Amino acid sequence: MAYYGKCIETVIEQLDQLKPGDSPEQVLEAASASLQTLSSQKQAFILEVLSGCLEYHRLLTTVVDAFYVRDGRLCLWADYNLFKVICYLATFQLGELGFQLFCDIVKSQPLDKMCKFLRFFFSPLNLSSWVKDEWSLVYEAAYVKENWIAPLMRWQPEVQELIKQLEAVLANQSPLLKTKAKVTEPKEFNLTTPRSRAIPMPEPVPAVAKPRPVPRSTYQQPKEQHLLDKTKRHNRRRAEELLLRANVEEMQCAVPRSRREPPTQGTGASPRLLQGSKKNLQLRFMPRILKTPKLTFYRPNNIPVKLNTAAILREGALYQRQVERELQRVDRLVDGAGDFSEFLEWQKKMQARDREEQLAAGECRRLLGKLSHEEAALARQHLVRGNKQKADQKKEEMTELMQQCAERRLQEERSMRELVEQVTEAQKNVKVAQTRLLKGRQQIVQEVIEESRELLQRSAEAAKEEQRRRCELISQLRALETQPMRKGKLVDLTQIPGYGLEGEMSVVELRERLALLKDAQRRAEEDKRDQIIQDKRSKSQELQNVVEQISLCRAAMGRSAALRWEEKKAGAAAPGLRSQDERVLALQRRIEETAAERRRQAPLLQVSAPRTPRAPRAQPRAQLEAQHWLELEQSRERSLHARHRRGSACGRARDLEAA
């Protein structure tokens, strides 16, 4: 029993030393090199169990992990490889070892752990359910059931009897008496009492300068923000009043009249006809109380906008350059220069041509998007056909690879068996080499012991010398501490040091000269401050003049912009029809050809597809595509109308500002 227990412990040690990157061949070579001292029978048993645990690592790990999750929650993770070895012996070596030898191996290990693991692993429910399913994921299900699950089910009566024996032994086992160990008594160290330290003098507290208080403006809002809020409330109140007045009162901007009726001024119409027409018009144009007019927000008169000096000067220079260019243009006209009417007409034509090109480019982009959609659908059909062909080729390649893998596994098993036989033959004549190696190691150990003894003697002598030197230094330091020291020194501030330097003076004279220098520096600062104040006043006056000039230029520019907008609004024409371009026609023909080709290939894919009930979706998809393109066209028309409305609204706002 002890014989097999030591072998199992050796296997567990080898598995504990295993690293994730090590290959099984390297592990077996290292294990065979470290087991040279054991007998050939033990070496063969240990190597066989170790190679089996490495080969069936995935199967054994599945069972042991499930054991720790379910029944082995209180077991230590240090026993992981122990359960792994027992699982391997029960699954793959129980028939070769025999049940009696397996019982001896189990009884050589801790009984409570073995009882718990065997009860979990040999449970018929576990073997026939999840163990079989998990192993079938790695190997074929028929092979697992025939070679591993069926033998384990046949060993059920004997294993259950073994489990009952282990439970009986655990129930009758008496607890071991613990011998009282000798308690170590601590002994106090004989240390030298340290001398009490002198209390140092307290350092003077430095006087800190009083900081400036935080200004109140830090926690207050600026005046500009209050003025802006007040202006917003005023505009809101005026807008509400205008809305109420527009909803209650009639329109009083002009006298209403019909479209076909001529104006009354300058004609000889009778008063009765005029009175009847006014009555009809009053009946026709009722006050619009239910309709909500559009709100018009008026620009406040005085908005405090804070500009810096650079912005004011930059804007003033801009307006000055504009004025100079206008004066130069007037001078050229006076001298007889030509007019720009022809250039303006040519510019209008070019703008109209550019607008038509933009519309054609937009239509091309839309058709390109539709063409890319059709080409994507056609490419998707080609991709589906190619994927089907690739899948068939992949299946054929997988069958060939499975056959090659099975043949390679058989060859590896044969090579492993030959390797094990070679290792067993090579280990027969090892004892002579072991004795030689043992003698060499003993000789090396004797030499190392002698060298370490000499090194210890040298280190002890060096430590004594160091201790003696430290004692001498301590005695010298204590002698220096006992000597008296002069702590103060008399200083005369009116006396010259007498070092022989040029410009040498006493401390009192130095202080007087520094005071005179500070007075001169203060007077220079006051003069410079006065000069800066004068410069600031002159610059502020110049900036004020520039600001007045900028306000005049802004007013003039606003009036000219309003006049230009009126001319542009009067001369604006309705948008023409989309011009048919050659690129647009070519794209339309290409889209029709691509759609026809896709419709021709669609029935082929529907016939070859395995799911035939989903084939009748071709007609709804065409309808959805048509609806999609119709929605795109409508959205572009809506965006164009919104752009025109936005432009007209901006024009009205500019007119009101100019007015």
Image (cartoon, rainbow, N blue to C red):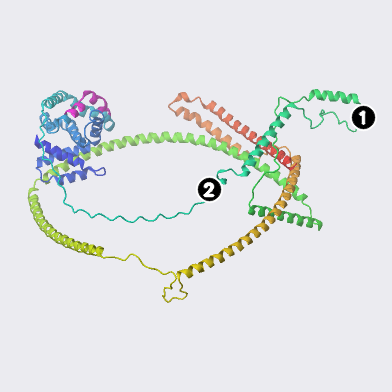
Of residue 207 and residue 139, the one placed in the foreground of this image is: 207
Residue occupying the point 57% across, 46% down: 217
Quadrant in which the C terminus is drawn: top right
Q: Which residues are magenta?
A: 115-133
The answer to which of 264 and 32 lies nearer the viewer is 264
Figure check: 200 above or below 155: below
- Asked which quadrant contains residue 51, the reply is top left
Residue type beneath disc 1: Gly
Q: Mainly helix, strand or loop, the magenta region? A: helix
Q: Position of residue 325 (x, y in %)?
A: 73, 55
Residue denoted by label 1: 268
Around disc 2, counting alpha carbons within 10 Å, would you say few (fewer than 14), some (14 to 19), or many (20 or more)?
few
The nearer-to-camera label among 1 and 2 is 2
Q: Amino acid at mark 2?
A: Val
Residue 168 in magenta stretch = no
Decide if residue 317 is in sight here.
no
586 or 353, which lies in front? 353
At mark 2, the secondary structure is loop
Residue in the foreground of this view, choosing between 409 and 339: 339
Residue 617 at x, y = what percent? 51, 26
Q: Which mark is residue 214?
A: 2
